[in-house]
Image (cartoon, rainbow, N blue to C red):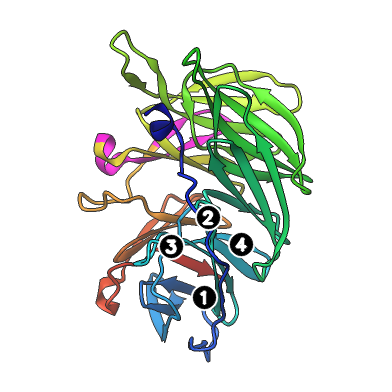
């Protein structure tokens, strides 16, 4: 039972590999400013002051939704993993940002629980009761390297997220000692050949499942505190700051409870923090200025926007994509612009490319 609750993804059976090209997919005939992926189509638009001008509607090759946090730019390509399709399979994906051609490779069971890219390679992780497997792919989704890190006796491990900092990978790991029931959070440093270089124990029993880096400094929102006297986890409300070189820690109090996602915007030198929508409603987002540590609410959702928005940053602009609307936030002026996608027939918008 403990293993069933702790493991992020169950390790079942290896599936055969399948690479699907984009031979039946339409390609754009005109340049665009933004491409938005719906379930069965991708639409391209141009920005016209505070309006979106539709350029083309293109048929997609497969009706698969991309995982929000895995959708990342790798130079002229975007890489991602998909959510499970109707066949309960997960795919790795590579998207050409010029042609919008999508290439899919059926993933091994649990293969892509977390992922990241350094612009040249696509890295994924797989959790199992025996440890964690790491994979390195090229942008054509050919497997180039595989490394395994076994768990210690009576310790279960789970990789939540990976980041690339300089020439190393940093993996955010939760551990559970099944003998003592002690939980902890660790940062594993790997080289790009997927060899383990270092384990850093943050010495925290609270749950940390997301992080972002500003240089060599990591910012980790506390998802849950240690358990109370009744054995129930308490809501998190702090930001852990950790320097991977000096191993020093600091804490920043947060305005709300249940932080769950964090991103960094270089143009404004601020963090954008997403909180649980059920607990915080329309004020589920906030900005935290790293120079002053001042946190301000950012209202970009509505009562019906309970799902996390797909988010991308383009200079000072932040774009929040909901299933039927797009919201832009200019971080230097504070201007918020709302674009309807419903009028173009979009109901399941979930990813976008901004050129």
**CA–CA distance between discs 4 and 2?**
10 Å
Residue 33's label in the rendered image is 1
Q: Is residue 288 highlighted in magenta?
A: yes
Q: Are marks 2 and 1 in contact (CB under 8 Å)?
A: no
**Residue holding disc 3:** 89
**Residue holding disc 2:** 70
Mark 4 vs mark 2, foreground winner is 2
Give the mark, 2 or 1, whose residue is nearer the N terminus.
1
Seen in the image, is 299 located left or right of residue 184?
left
Q: Secondary structure at mark 3?
A: loop
Instruction: Answer few, some or many: residues within 10 Å of disc 2's Cα (few below 14, many 20 plus, some between 14 and 19).
Output: many
Residue 73's label in the rendered image is 4
Mark 4 vs mark 3, foreground winner is 3
Q: Secondary structure at mark 1?
A: loop
Instruction: Answer few, some or many: residues within 10 Å of disc 4's Cα (few below 14, many 20 plus, some between 14 and 19).
Output: some
Q: Secondary structure at mark 2?
A: loop
Instruction: Answer few, some or many: residues within 10 Å of disc 1's Cα (few below 14, many 20 plus, some between 14 and 19).
Output: some
Quarter holding the N terminus is: top left
Mark 3 vs mark 2, foreground winner is 3
User: Farthest residue in the front direction?
Assistant: 13
- The image quadrant that residue 236 belongs to is top left
Give the mark, 3 or 2, whose residue is nearer the N terminus.
2
User: Farthest residue in the top direction?
Assistant: 229
Mark 3 vs mark 1, foreground winner is 3
**Front in this rendered view, residue 278 or 291:** 278
Give the x, y percent position of residue 173: 57, 32
Q: Residue at x 64, y 30 (%)?
A: 187
Q: Are marks 4 and 1 in contact (CB under 8 Å)?
A: no
Q: Residue at x 47, y 74 (%)?
A: 35
Stretch in magenta: 279-296
Give the x, y percent position of residue 112: 54, 53
Give the x, y percent position of residue 15: 52, 62
């Amino acid at each position: 039972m403990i293993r069933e609750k702790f493991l992020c993804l169950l390790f079942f059976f290896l599936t055969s590999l399948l690479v699907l090209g984009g031979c039946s997919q339409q390609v754009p005939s005109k340049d665009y400013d933004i491409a938005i992926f719906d379930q069965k189509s991708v639409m391209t638009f141009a920005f016209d002051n505070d309006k979106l001008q539709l350029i083309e509607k293109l048929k997609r090759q497969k009706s698969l939704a991309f995982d929000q946090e895995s959708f990342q730019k790798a130079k002229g390509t975007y890489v991602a993993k998909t959510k499970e399709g109707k066949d309960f399979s997960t795919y790795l994906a590579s998207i050409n940002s010029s042609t919008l051609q999508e290439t899919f490779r059926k993933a091994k069971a649990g293969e892509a629980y977390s992922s990241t890219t350094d612009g040249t390679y696509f890295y994924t992780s797989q959790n199992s009761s025996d440890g964690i497997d790491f994979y390195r792919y090229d942008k054509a989704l050919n497997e180039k390297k595989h490394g395994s890190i076994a768990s210690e006796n009576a310790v279960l491990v789970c990789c939540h997220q990976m980041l690339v900092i300089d020439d190393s990978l940093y993996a955010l790991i939760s551990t559970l000692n099944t003998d003592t029931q002690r939980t902890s959070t660790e940062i594993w440093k790997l080289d790009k050949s997927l060899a383990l270089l270092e384990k850093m124990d943050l010495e925290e029993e609270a749950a940390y499942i997301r992080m972002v880096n500003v240089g060599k400094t990591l910012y980790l929102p506390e998802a849950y505190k240690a358990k109370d006297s009744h054995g129930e986890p308490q809501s998190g409300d702090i930001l852990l700051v950790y320097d991977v070189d000096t191993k020093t820690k600091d804490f920043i109090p947060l305005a709300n409870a249940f932080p769950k996602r964090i991103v960094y915007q270089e143009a404004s030198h601020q963090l954008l923090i997403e909180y649980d929508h059920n607990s915080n409603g329309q004020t589920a987002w906030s900005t935290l200025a790293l120079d002053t540590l001042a946190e301000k609410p950012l209202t970009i959702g509505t009562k019906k926007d309970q799902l996390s928005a797909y988010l991308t940053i383009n200079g000072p602009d932040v774009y929040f994509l909901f299933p039927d609307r797009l919201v832009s936030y200019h971080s230097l002026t504070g201007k918020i612009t709302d674009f309807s996608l419903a009028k173009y027939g979009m109901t399941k918008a979930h990813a976008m490319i901004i050129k």
